[in-house]
Amino acid sequence: MVRRVAVVGAGSSGLACIKICVEEGLEPVCFESSDDIGGLWKFKESPEPERSGIYRSLVVNTSKEMMCYSDFPMPADYPNYMHNSQLLQYYRLYADHFDLLRYIHFQTTVKSVAQKPDFSLSGQWDIVTINKDGEEERNVFDAVMVCSGHYTHPSLPLSGFPGYETFSGRCFHSWEYKDADACRGKRVVVVGIGNSGGDIAVEISRSAKKTFLSTREGAWVIGRMSSNGLPLDMTATTRLNNMLTLLLPNTLVNWAAERALNYKYDHRLYGLKPKHRLMDRRPLINDDLPGRILQGALVMKTNLKGFKDSGVEFEDGRVEENIDAVVFCTGYNVKFPFLPSVLTDGPQGELTLYKTLFPPSLVRPTLAVMGLFRSKGPITPIVEMQARWVVKVFTGSSCLPPKEKMLEVIESERKRNMKSYPCPRTAALQVEYIPYLDFMAKEVGVRPNLLTLLLTDPVLWVRIFFGPCTPYQYRLTGPGQWAGARQVILTQWERLAQPFRNQSGTGEQAVCDFSLGACTWRNSCNGFCSV
Ligand SMILES: Cc1cc2nc3c(=O)[nH]c(=O)nc-3n(C[C@H](O)[C@H](O)[C@H](O)COP(=O)(O)OP(=O)(O)OC[C@H]3O[C@@H](n4cnc5c(N)ncnc54)[C@H](O)[C@@H]3O)c2cc1C
Ligand SMILES: *[C@@H]1O[C@H](CO)[C@@H](O)[C@H](O)[C@H]1NC(C)=O
Ligand SMILES: *[C@@H]1O[C@H](CO)[C@@H](O)[C@H](O)[C@H]1NC(C)=O
């Protein structure tokens, strides 16, 4: 019988795990090494070793209705894309509302998690923690949920670049970057075009003399703002679109989407065009990058090749002299120093995980690694659903396939993803947003049944099929059902509009019918919303 569950970390993932454990009648004990909740979203003025770090200006890249917990919508007046401090505020509201703080032991670090000698019978774990006074404690738990985050160990591949020892400028990782103050009037190179690389290059380009953005592969760049100024994910992440991408030929979907994007800014002209097709990978979400290129403040460069005294050389042979700083936005190494080494058994010493959650080598499925995946959608709703499934597996009400079968699935999913992501390690992490959520929801018994819905509640069906796949959809029926779910789906467009209403400069009140989302809104706005 699983009863006591250790939750490692009290970031957005840890909070969801605590809440779901309580909901399912388990006893969570959460260990958090820092003195606060929020993890990544708790801004720190200076980098702290082994902790994630974000820059001061960071604004989320997923919108509020899409990234919230499934039974706790964000306050209506929050902006659709909020500053990191406001997201932390939301996590505080969540923790207060569900009274989660009392399960958390702050300033307590998990040092090791090891199978008990009788693991094959008990499935139990020995966990050693160390508190702020340096006192070690050993405890036995029936199960473990690992929520320690993945942006803690920056990957800084300096030694791969000849000449860096004698380079006169400063080199540092985006993990250390807080703001562009130190870059005023300087010549700066930013390396890497992930979401951080794009944000940081744009910000630096506003105060630096010249900013260069070096990229190996380029990227498709797409703004947070979709048609009619609606949040991109609210219009793109729908069940209809999910179905269309399955039914229509890939090349057609790519052709149409790339055409639409290039219509705004031709990626080839802007030096951004990647080799991969648009739908194959996650695009870079950035509103300002093309504009900074157009204004000449930001200059695109090929892959970094090496350093020469005060200069930087790129793969096309060109050299930029007098570079003051190079910011490496080169990602992170995933590390779980407290986990037993038998679990990191992948080809390159990485974790092998069934459905990015369960190590198949365990004879008892009593440990899960939360949030270790990449998707085109927001992280939190997936982690919350992971927690709902994991708890079912812990308690035995949902069963995993035999080990051989799990390994087979892992391998076939990796193979499928290799088409878009040639690196096996990266390929193993990719999940498709709606299909992955639906898969887990089916295991839990909370997947919305579209056919039944069409017959019994066509009004809701329309929102669920044509509208954004907001997390509330997974609270309509089954275990963990929430009576408010239907209502918050019907009102999601109103919460989207609320922050705009608050700031209406004309004093006019928007009288809109949001029922069908974007289309109805535009047509029924009586001139108010039309530009
Ligand atoms: C720059 C950046 C921007 C992002 N923007 C978005 C976004 O807009 N939308 C989105 O959905 N996702 C975004 N993400 C992804 C983000 O990582 C997740 O949304 C989410 O914050 C992950 O939360 P977490 O709880 O899993 O990890 P974290 O927030 O990293 O929390 C982990 C916690 O575990 C604690 N911990 C670690 N090790 C131990 C230990 N041994 N013992 C005890 N405690 C420990 C840490 O102190 C920390 O509090 C972004 C990521 C980055 C890096
Ligand atoms: C948002 O940015 C983070 C950090 O770079 C990234 O991991 C995540 O995938 C991005 N989300 C989307 C939807 O692109
Ligand atoms: C928006 O308006 C509501 C209702 O009038 C108010 O309670 C809220 O504080 C306002 N929010 C902001 C950000 O002004």
Image (cartoon, grey):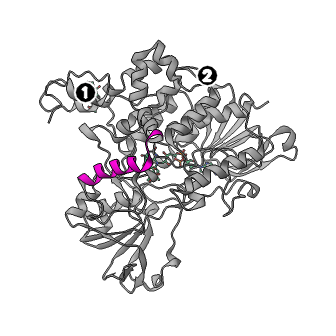
**Label 1 crowd (10 A; few <14 / some 14-19 / many >=20):** some
* Residue farthest to the left, as pictured: 506
* Relative image position of residue 433 (x, y in whole percent): 50, 41
Q: Residues within 10 Å of mark 2 (few under 14, many from 20)?
A: some
Q: Which residues are drawn in magenta?
A: 247-263
- Please give left or right for residue 317 compared with residue 28 in the image: left
Within 8 Å: ligand 3 and the Cβ of disc 1?
Answer: no
Label 2: which residue? 479
Q: Nearer the viewer, residue 27 or 317?
A: 317
Q: Quadrant of residue 461?
A: top left
Tag 1: amino acid? Trp
- Considering depth in this image, is 231 or 245 the residue closer to the camera? 245
Whether residue 434 is visible to the viewer of this picture, yes or no, is yes
Ligand 3 quadrant in view: top left
Q: Nearer the viewer, mark 2 or mark 1?
A: 1
The quarter of the picture where the N terminus appears is: top right
Judge whether 458 appears above or below 378 on screen: above
Residue appearing at x 72%, y 49% in the figure: 407
Farthest-out residue, top:
456
Residue 468 coordinates in the image, percent (x, y): 40, 32
- Which residue is rendered at x = 27% and y = 32% of the image? 499
Q: Which mark is residue 521?
A: 1
Res 240 label: none
Q: Amino acid at mark 2?
A: Pro
Q: Is residue 138 visible?
A: no
Q: Secondary structure at mark 1?
A: helix
Between residues 98 and 522, which one lies in front from this camera angle? 522
SS majority, magenta:
helix
> Does dot 2 land on a helix, a strand or a loop?
loop
Measure the C-alpha gap from mark 2 to mark 1.
34 Å
Relative placement, left or right, of 66 versus 436 is left
User: Where does the image place residue 322, in percent across and percent down from the top left?
Assistant: 30, 82
